[in-house]
Image (cartoon, rainbow, N blue to C red):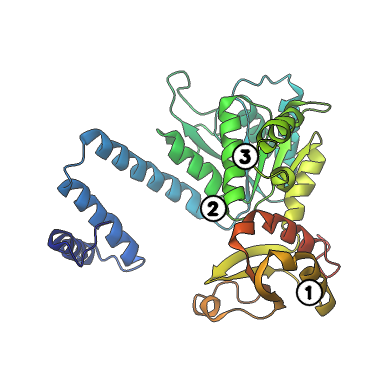
Amino acid sequence: MTDQHTDPAASSIAAEAASFLDHLGIVTNRDLISEIVTTAGELGQDRTDRLDLKITASAIDEMRDAFLMFAPYKDRPKVTIFGSARTAAVDPVYVQTHDVASALAGAGWMVVTGAGPGIMLAAMEGAGPAQSIGVSIRLPFESRANDVIHDDPKHVSMKYFFTRKLMLVKESKGFVAVPGGFGTLDETLELLTLQQTGKAEPTPIVLLDAPGGTFWQGFASFVQDEVAQRGLVAADDLDRVLITDSWEAAVAEILGFWRNYHSLRWVGKRLVLRLRAEPTASEAAALNEQFGDRLLEGGIERRGPLAAEVSSDDHVGLARLVMVWNPFKVGDLHQLIRAVNALPSAPAS
């Protein structure tokens, strides 16, 4: 965005945007709404190409539709299931997907898919219409969502893959990928990239195969033998992923990840890990022993909410561990979370 302090035209747009927001009576999150409106004006002043403007307008419009669709369910845990539209109902992977979705829905989770046929239909059949959310893509050869979610208000259709992928990822607290083609591999690799780089908060990722299947084991071998061997990823980058052919293990992995761990927040250079149960002093000491080399300074401390959390009323009733975690080790946060979930003080389930 243009610096309004040095560009009179930008300052004028900002002033007009403020007047416009006054007219609409917008108060909540006014700063961000003003930034969006101001940027739109600047795009016009830039004489931006019409095609670029169409992309921008369509992306914002369909993101708004998706935000509205997800809003009533923001407090419900969600799992996104990725897989191929080409998978037949007789395929063992189809049955695995149905079973994992059914079990997670039974535990109170909503199941998010791309709303198409194949694996997406299997997941929605397993979860049932009430627990299903669909984010479909408009393709020449797929004119409608599957029968479970078609005409359901919990479905949104999108033009662009990049906005669709955003919505399939941002709302969910767990992910299951089953064998699929380029689309499934694209979605899985994006998940791994987001976790590796710390661009997304840690979440459980399960690569679920058919009983005795080799699809994901072959993927892991390629990553280890070709990608990691060349130094292009770390040898332990797949440690944060569960590869299994058991739908029961997949369910246990997703539910277990949230056994004690609740959420995290960065406050300046400090990482705040929020937990359902407070660790004992000896448990905190053991965590320091295990993870001290991932810290930039100091240790892992038990303490109450930080001032920034109190001012925003950000889960102030939860227990906390506070530390100065090395930002270059964000991928290792999965290990810390698994450790706090395994503490004797953690809830039983």
First of labels 1, 2 by sequence position: 2
At mark 2, the secondary structure is loop
Which residue is drawn at the image coordinates 70% and 39% (left, top)? 101
At mark 3, the secondary structure is loop
Q: Residue furthest front?
A: 230
Point out which mark residue 243 bears.
none
**In contact (CB < 8 Å): disc 2 and disc 3:** no
Residue marked by disc 1: 284
The quadrant of the rendering that contains the N terminus is bottom left
Point out which mark residue 199 bears.
2
Point out which mark residue 232 bears.
3
Task: Give the percent coordinates (x, y) of residue 66.
Answer: 44, 45
Kind of residue at disc 2: Lys
Tell whether 46 sits left or right of 348: left
At mark 1, the secondary structure is helix
Task: Give the percent coordinates (x, y) of residue 64.
Answer: 38, 48
Q: Is residue 132 visible?
A: no
Tell whether 214 sits left or right of 5: right
Tell whether 330 sits left or right of 3: right
Residue 318 falls in image quadrant: bottom right
Kind of residue at disc 3: Leu
Which residue is drawn at the image coordinates 54% and 72% (left, top)? 267
Q: Vertically, is 305 above or below 287?
A: below
Q: Vertically, is 121 above or below 236?
A: above
**In contact (CB < 8 Å): disc 1 and disc 3:** no
First of labels 1, 3 by sequence position: 3
Which residue is drawn at the image coordinates 81% and 41% (left, top)? 248
Q: Vertically, is 297 above or below 56?
A: below
Q: Residues within 10 Å of mark 1 (few under 14, many from 20)?
A: some
CA–CA distance in space, label 1 to label 3: 34 Å
Q: Vertically, is 252 above or below 316?
A: above
